[in-house]
Amino acid sequence: MTRREALYQCLGGSKWGPELVEPHEIDSICSQLKKKSSRIYIECLKREKELVLKPEEIIRQWFLGRLVKKYHYDLKHIRVEYPIKIGASNRKADIAIVNPDDPTAVDLIVELKKPVNKTGRDQLKSYCNATGAPIGVWTNGNQITFYHRREPNLFENLTDIPRSDQSLSDILTETFTLKDLIINDKIANQRKSLREVIMELEDEVFANSGEDVFEEVFKLIFVKLYDEQLSAEDKVIIDRHVKTKMPNQHSYSSLQAHVAKINDDQFRSLEFRNRGDGTRKLKERLQVLFDEAKETWQGIFEEEDRILLQPDHLAVCVSSLQDVKLFNSNLMVIDEAFEHLISQNAKGVKGQFFTPRHVIDMCVKMLNPVPGEYMIDSASGSCGFPVHTIFHLNGELFTNRITDMNAEARRNIKRIFGIDFDKAAVRVARTLNLIAGDGGTNVIELNTLDFVRWDERKNDDDWHERNANGYRELSKLRLRKNDNRQFKFDIVMANPPFAGEIREPRILNQYQLASTGDVLKEGIGRHILFLERNLDFLKPGGRMAIVLPEGLLNNPTQQNIREFLLDRARVLAVVSLHINTFKPHTGTKTSVVFIQKWPDDDGICPKVEDYEIFFAISETPGKNNSGDYVYVKNEDGLTRLDTHGHLMIDHDLHDHDGMLEEQIAEKFIHWAEDKELSFHVN
């Protein structure tokens, strides 16, 4: 067994973080290994003695080496197993750095864990409080967090720790540009999700703040997106440099290395930063940004809305969020966070959940929206289907280069619509749609199924102010004037809520599927009415992707629904999703059904009695039995990033822009081209 093999075997194979631990550091640790008899030992840099090889000791030696070689601390000021007294208990900190001028004063405490362990942050903070250390570091070799202890029980995140020749104020006051954000992106570097960051803030800040978590975090994300967008010109320079130096696909770490070489002396300094200039000044600065963002992206917040967090609490939140890069995100980063924030009482009870991004991308690729087409999501949630349709039309994800969008692209985006009855979800969707669509949005707060009452909403001044423009554009697509039943959309994509029944006769009377003969049913599932409603949104020849419970497709008692569908549309494809796809919210087995509405004449989808249907079964869902995402691993067993710095979910629905082998979406496209379907023509 080689030294490297022994190292990885001890760590548990794939539990080491390659984006955090550099290759030369691994080589250095390997050089410290020695075999005696049947046991492997590691020589401690500080204690100059050989210790039995254990995961925690590997992490300690890695960080000791980093303190010496990267941060230039002298070993004589570094302590290992530093004794700390907390009350009646005697504890030991893994690593401590004492002040060169006063060895009794501790400048920095490091808490180390083995790679699979994510605990210990509270322990670190207690050590900092007990010793008065102003800086703390927590790491398990996969993730790392730097803290500034500003006062007891008030810890702020740092982007990095000072070198031995720097002070804490040097770190806090350094100019930080978009280039620095790309290099220090917490999601890419630490494999830390925005959801995890927010959950930590809930415990550390919001449990004691008295403020609404959703509202205040929403404001901060809104402000941070705006701050990143203000650096659009710097993004142009970065993109030009990367395109020149990296014409082909590379890893995100390679991109970061190339970005690091860019001279950013003339770049704009990001404002969403805790610069250590006082919490009140920080709040004043962010309020100015918030007001500017509200003016630029209207319709999300009221003019009088303000950031309500107390300055101290705000400083902690900003420190935690400032190194998370939101632009150039595929939205899963933001969606996962908002899905956590929007209470389960508001969403889950209604059977409505945010659709996983890999499911959305499969649907978009298979339906292939083209410029000029009108698209709607009738149960839009955070607007995943509409925004990914925009990505498809523009050929790229979120950037902060939206000023590059030409007039034709803007016109195409105005043809994308979303409807949802949940006010919180609509606000999230508007934010994302506004940014992706260069300041315009057609996301409307409506009950899709209760369309006979839509026009009544215009009498609600508050609703009218927020929704009038989008509703006016939607009305232009009605098949008949003043009738909200039928529309002329080219594409519908939706994941309607499954749970619960509609029992109001006033609503049921509007739907053919709500009756058996002339007898109105007492109640019917929402998703069944959505199926009929979505068909009414489509023009003849229009196409649809809809997520449905699998029982609807094979249960004998649902035969009348299948006959209704087959009478009105051609079934193009059925993709059976894995049962884990929508966990942890529901274990309902689902399928995505793709259809094309029969035309009134011999149009682009002439009606035939007999035709082939594309069937596929997803066997790799991208989630485990607990509903946690599962990620693609490299050959060495380490998690893989795409070119945007996203963790690549392990699924079989599409090829991830060619980075994986052809999957279900690509196989459907080949099939559709062979069958000469109207929307996939060679």
Image (cartoon, rainbow, N blue to C red):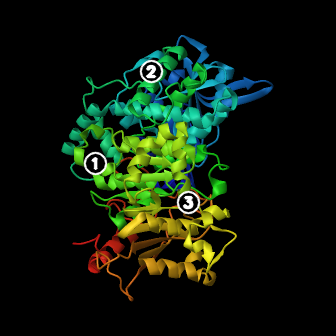
Residue that appears at 61% across and 46% down:
117
Q: Closer to the camera, 681 or 501?
A: 501
Where does label 3 land, which residue? 449
Q: Are marks 2 and 3 in contact (CB under 8 Å)?
A: no
Q: Nearer the viewer, mark 3 or mark 1?
A: 3
Distance between mark 2 and mark 1 Cα atoms = 31 Å
Q: Amino acid at mark 3?
A: Leu
Quick one: 153 or 627, which is closer to the camera? Answer: 627
Residue at image mark 1: 411
- From the viewer's perspective, is the residue at label 2 or at label 3 nearer? 3
| Lower sequence index among marks 3 and 1 | 1
Q: Is residue 79 left or right of residue 70?
A: right
Question: Could you say where residue 529 lies in the image, as x and y percent from the top left?
Answer: 56, 67
**Relative to residue 209, is residue 376 depicted above or below?**
below
Image coordinates for residue 213, horizontal then vertical, percent: 61, 35
Foreground tag (2 vs 1): 1
Residue farthest to the front? 482
Instruction: Give the residue type at disc 1.
Output: Arg
**Upstream in the sequence, badge 2 or badge 3?**
2
Q: Tag 3's secondary structure?
A: loop
The answer to whether residue 42 shows anywhere in this view is no
Q: Amino acid at mark 2?
A: Val
Which class describes the residues within 10 Å of circle 1: few (<14), some (14-19), or many (20+)? Answer: some
Asked where in the image residue 171 lies, by quadrant, the reply is top left
Q: Which residue is mark 2?
A: 288
Towards the viewer: 652 or 74: 652
Q: Left of 46 or right of it: where is 670?
A: left
